[in-house]
Amino acid sequence: MIQDITGVVGGKPHWPAPDELGTQRTEPVATPIAIPTEPPPHEPEPVESPGKKSPNFLIGAVIAVAIAIVVGWALWFTGEPRQRERVVEPPVAKAPEAPQKPKEVPTPEVFVTTSGPGIEAPIQRAFTNSIGMKFVLILEGSFVMGSRLAIEELLRRFGGEKGWYEWEKPSHSVRIKRSFYLQSAPVTQGQWQRLMGNNPSHFKDCGENCPVEKVSWEDARQFIKKLNEVEKTEDYRLPSEAEWEYACQGSSDAEFSFGDEVERLYEFAWYSKNSGDKTHPVGDKEPNGWGLYDMHGNVWEWVEDDWHDSYEGAPDDGRAWIDSPRGSARVIRGGGWYNDALVCRSAFRASLWSESRYSLVGFRLSRSVALGPKF
């Protein structure tokens, strides 16, 4: 199935198929524990000169002989040894404990943030909508989009093809001018089922808390349309590519949301080396600094933008880069359960036709703050 994905060459969409990655999957090798080859040194016990017996030794020998005679007589008399019965102490009564107060659930902090030019509105850091989708607030800010490393350095660290890294160039400064909400994890099968009444996923046995997949960009737009109707709003949407990378990475210049240590990807992502070739429930790995789960791995995520081969001419204010008329290919981000570490990097980007459906691809939603819920 995955090998059917076509590449972006001369304007056609592309993302790395399994046979292009060229990397063999290897299970992590545990570091062997050093085992001492010699016993620890010890001081020798003092040795008495032969022929001398201390008084303590003679007294001990007499006592041992006497004990042996008594035990032998007892065994002969009873016919067989008896096991000593274990003495069980009666339980000690304890004073009843005072009833514990139920754990308090903290109310999300309400604060004021700029939600538009000259507009201020009190909003919460997080909210959950009518079908159980949790959203967290991503505050406005600046970051550098794309990888800051030279292509030669990226090839040395991660391998792959030079063309993949050219899609991340040239890196450019972006100012996210308006705070926005982003779903804390990808849309799940249960959330899709509750709203759409069906489940298109390939990995249905994974459960309703696993990400919905085999949904096209067009399918995601239908989900958004229906959700806006149910909640009587127009604020739900797909995030822009710039918003997605900013939410994944923040202002850090590292290759992953947690830093550059590729061996730590196990803690944050389901990918080729730990996924078992399937999706997993969302939120089982560690979140990033914003409190977002599965930004690396599990499933790729659709964003709003049309595909472009580089960032030459990309918006610098966080808006989606949309052609007029629109192209046929859309951007996907984050990597999936099949992909290696280099593809799960924060800056890595790829594309598919907007009507494509694969078990590697899902999505998460954004919600605008300026017209969003007032709490």
Image: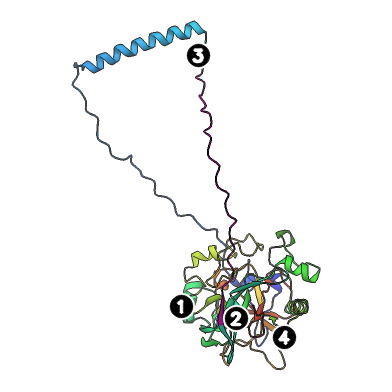
- Image position, residue 373 (x, y; %): 67, 79
Looking at the image, is mark 1 or mark 2 earlier in the sequence? Answer: 2
Q: CA distance from mark 4 to mark 2?
A: 39 Å
Residue type for callout 3: Pro
- Marks 4 & 3, CB-CB < 8 Å contact: no
Looking at the image, is mark 3 or mark 2 earlier in the sequence? Answer: 3
Residue, disc 3: 81
Residue, disc 2: 122
Up-down relation of residue 347 to residue 286 (above or below): below
Looking at the image, is mark 4 or mark 3 earlier in the sequence? Answer: 3
Q: Is residue 105 magenta?
A: yes
In the rendering, which numbered label is found on residue 169?
Answer: none
Q: CA distance from mark 1 to mark 4?
A: 33 Å
User: Is residue 206 shown left or right of residue 97?
Assistant: right
Residue, disc 1: 153
Residue, disc 4: 328
